[in-house]
Amino acid sequence: MAEINKILIANRGEIAVRIARACRDVGITSVAVYSDPDRTAFHVRCADEAYPLGGTTSAETYLVQEKIIAAAKESGAEAIHPGYGFLAENHEFARLCAANDIIFIGPTPEVIRLLGDKLEARQTAIKAGLPLAPASTQNVEDIKGAKAEAEKIGYPVLIKAAAGGGGKGMRIVEKSEDLEAALRMAASEASSAFGDKRVYIEKYIARPRHIEIQIMADSHGNVVYLGERECSIQRRHQKVIEESPSAVVDEGLRKRMGEAAVAIAKETGYIGAGTVEFLVDEKLDFYFLEVNTRLQVEHPVTEMITGIDLVLEQFAVARGEKLSFAQKDISCHGHAIECRIYAEEAAAGFIPSTGRLAAYREPAGPGVRVDSGFVAGDEIPVYYDPLIAKLVTWGADRHQAIARMHRALTEYTVAGVDTTIPFGLLVMENKSFGEGRLSTHFIEDEFADLADSLREPDDKQQLSAMAAALIDFHNQARLSKLGERKGSAVNKWKMSGRMAGLRKA
């Protein structure tokens, strides 16, 4: 068994805080890394030690493999947890960790590379016997080949990037005459986002549900599934609200999807936490979509209904231990819903909103969990993903989980930036959502007039702006001395509680 006494967290925001807390629960020393804008960030203060990366943007900091490795070596960390995003699904980084005798908390580099390429992942899924939507078997490079594939598959089709995800390099094509322009744009976007212009064509499934299966595997050949998550409410192909279990998945469908997820994991020799994603059509037939070889943003809903701490299981598996449970030991209780709290203006098309959190107060009470990366007075920077927190509620059934989410959203106070809290409330009050009638087109189907639905009266806007300005002035005065510390080092500084008083509004 490998010994892990110190873990470097190669991430920022709420997921870095989440991992640092897991470390503290089991007595593992946590190490944070930070960019210049994140010098006083909450994830830095939650860790036991912190090391600067030097730079501002992701490309200068959290994506620079050599800087992360150097920080791990300087700190003496035996392992690196990548969280999600940044280097979490980078097989070259996982390989670099191994070359430096550092444990990468995740699958092997070979598995990450295999499943990270959607074309190769599809071929692997076929070998494992998973159902797939019709698609081209290789990348399409010219319009002639693309048209031939699209005609064979049948319109509408979806052009997808072979590498990456998050909706980048993806275009829906309804008819032949639109194919060339869509192909060009998808390839260009894929090249820009992932450095890989390869795209392929897949049958477009109209109004599907996006349902995923959480898996966990160890190095001893044990693989289990931990139920499903419904992730159909999306904007720009990115999830904003998730729940578990799905309103339409019964025990039979859950077992079939779970066994399919386990099959592809065993086919690849998967180790660690992962998610196998599927599209489910109106007939409840499911089709393999992709495998995310990391911890998902929405993992808390699974933890809430199973009682299993997925991060601690990741630690144990990375040490070489067997899973602490078998498939027969997993039972799901109640219902959990997650609303991602983004610094975005939903009424304006979910555009990012940056600025200082003039006021910030999280909800609490029965069945409420908040995974947050910020506190009052913090700045929401322009350089990174605008996720502030994940609000999760649990209930004995779906109705109670929705009611608690509605209550928690009304208690959530954020001033200084726009957030998706009003949008979350709108969804919780929506009849179709309440009845479990969802698809990946939910937002455009239900909220064609989203801007009008979310627009506040002018007098309320004025009062909110005035209150935010007053609170911001008060907080900035309290933080003025902290601002004078610009450029100071915080390496090996025991952060816990050190600056809490400065951040109270």
Image (cartoon, rainbow, N blue to C red):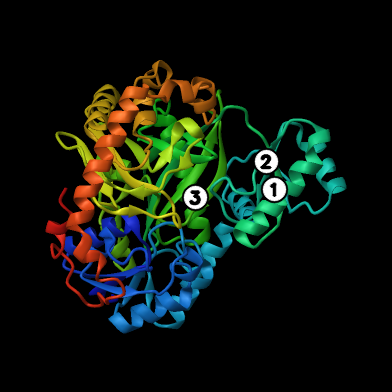
At mark 2, the secondary structure is strand
When the figure is inspected, residue 83 is found, relative to residue 348, above or below; the finding is: below
The numbered dot on residue 47 is none
Which residue matches tag 3? 263
Count residues near mark 1 (Cα–Cα under 10 Å), then give few for <14, some for 14-19, many for 20+.
many
At mark 3, the secondary structure is helix
Which residue matches tag 2? 171
Earlier residue among tags 1 and 3: 1
Q: Indicate left or right for 162 with 112 as reference.
A: right
**Cα distance, mark 3 to mark 2?**
30 Å
The quarter of the displayed image where residue 319 is located:
bottom left
Which residue matches tag 1? 186
Across and down, in percent, residue 367 comes to: 19, 35
**Depth check: 126 or 467 in front?**
467
Count residues near mark 2 (Cα–Cα under 10 Å), then give few for <14, some for 14-19, many for 20+.
many
**Depth check: 265 or 199 in front?**
199
Earlier residue among tags 3 and 2: 2
At mark 1, the secondary structure is helix
**Cα distance, mark 2 to mark 1?**
6 Å
Across and down, in percent, residue 361 comes to: 20, 41
The amino acid beneath tag 3 is: Ala
